[in-house]
Image (cartoon, helix red, strand yellow):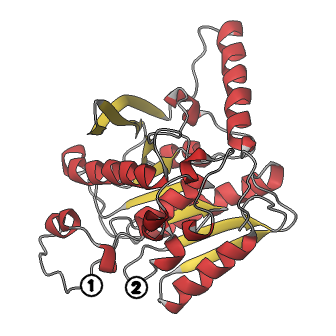
Amino acid sequence: MMKQWTWPCTFLLWLVVVSGQLSAFAESSPETELPPVGTVVPDVICGRVDALALTYDLLVPVAKPNGATVIFVVSGGWNSVWFPPEMAMVPEWNGMSLLHDLLTDGYHVAIVRHGSAPRFKVPDAASHVRKALQHLREKAPERGLDPERIGSFGFSAGGHLSLYLAMLGGEEATPELRASRQDSDETKEIAAPLAAVVAWYPPVDMVRIVGPSDSFPALDFDPELAHEVSLIRHVDAGDAPVLIQHGTADQLVPLLGSRMMLNALEKADVPVELEIYEDAGHGFVGDDATRSSARAKAWFDRWLLPPPGSKSPS
């Protein structure tokens, strides 16, 4: 994996474009509202770091809730940017309709952000999203949601952090996770706190890229900590089902890492698929974006929804 990365601009560019589109839309038609696929519970505090609050925005579907939640980890280069959560409800983002489709079908969506570089590094970001997941699990019953039907997705660094959450089962299971399942037997295999993950072009081995970086200051942390956030080194049978989506022309995060992740998960008997997009780079557009969005939605439906004929939580 290359040490000197360039900034993954696609997501940030998308934010700029969509922000401009929404601003123009509002100015030209002030009485027109976006399709009512959900409502926003903003700035839910899930933890604190020093005096700083860690938050997420919870999108509640207008449709009948299906009991499942999907986390969107907002991270590029382990920097987490803010955008109005209402933007997630637009029918299409540069060819992608995943969040809109999830809300339409009754999923709750949590837009999770973490502390960003240069103050916070990759291990910090991992800790922050872990706190968000723990909070979502704890609050699920009172929200009428199932803590065992939570998924996560992200792009690039967001994909890395989503995979990190997928690997907190098995040997990595925390006391909090065991307590939530009323299981204190530390020798017992325990499933991950997530039920499904979709990761677009994720870096998977921090050991190989940790160190000073002008482009990615989040990588400048103690090399002794790199192993714990190197996903390829933590695969076991307790991990959540994973869908990885990657392009053959990605010059930022080479496809090889995803192929290695596929092999490791298969050897551990973890349900996994690798969807490869010919000639796609780091950041999908057009048909690749549309197809990958549909694949992600199908993956969450497969692993987060109850089988036909069974009852989901009300």
Label 1 sits on residue: 189
Q: Secondary structure at mark 2?
A: loop
What's the residue at 28%, 35% (across, down)? 50
Give the distance between the C-alpha atoms of the residues marked 2 and 1, in whole angstroms: 8 Å
Q: Position of residue 246 (x, y in %)?
A: 72, 65
Q: Amino acid at mark 1?
A: Glu
Circle number at residue 148: none
What's the residue at 43%, 64% (across, down)? 225
Label 2 sits on residue: 237
Q: Position of residue 293 (x, y in %)?
A: 66, 55
What's the residue at 31%, 60% (across, down)? 312
Q: Is residue 128 left or right of residue 252?
A: left
Instruction: Say whether marks 2 and 1 touch (CB < 8 Å).
Output: yes
Quarter of the picture containing the N terminus is bottom right
For residue 305, what is the image quadrant? bottom left
Residue 72 sits above or below residue 250 on the image: above
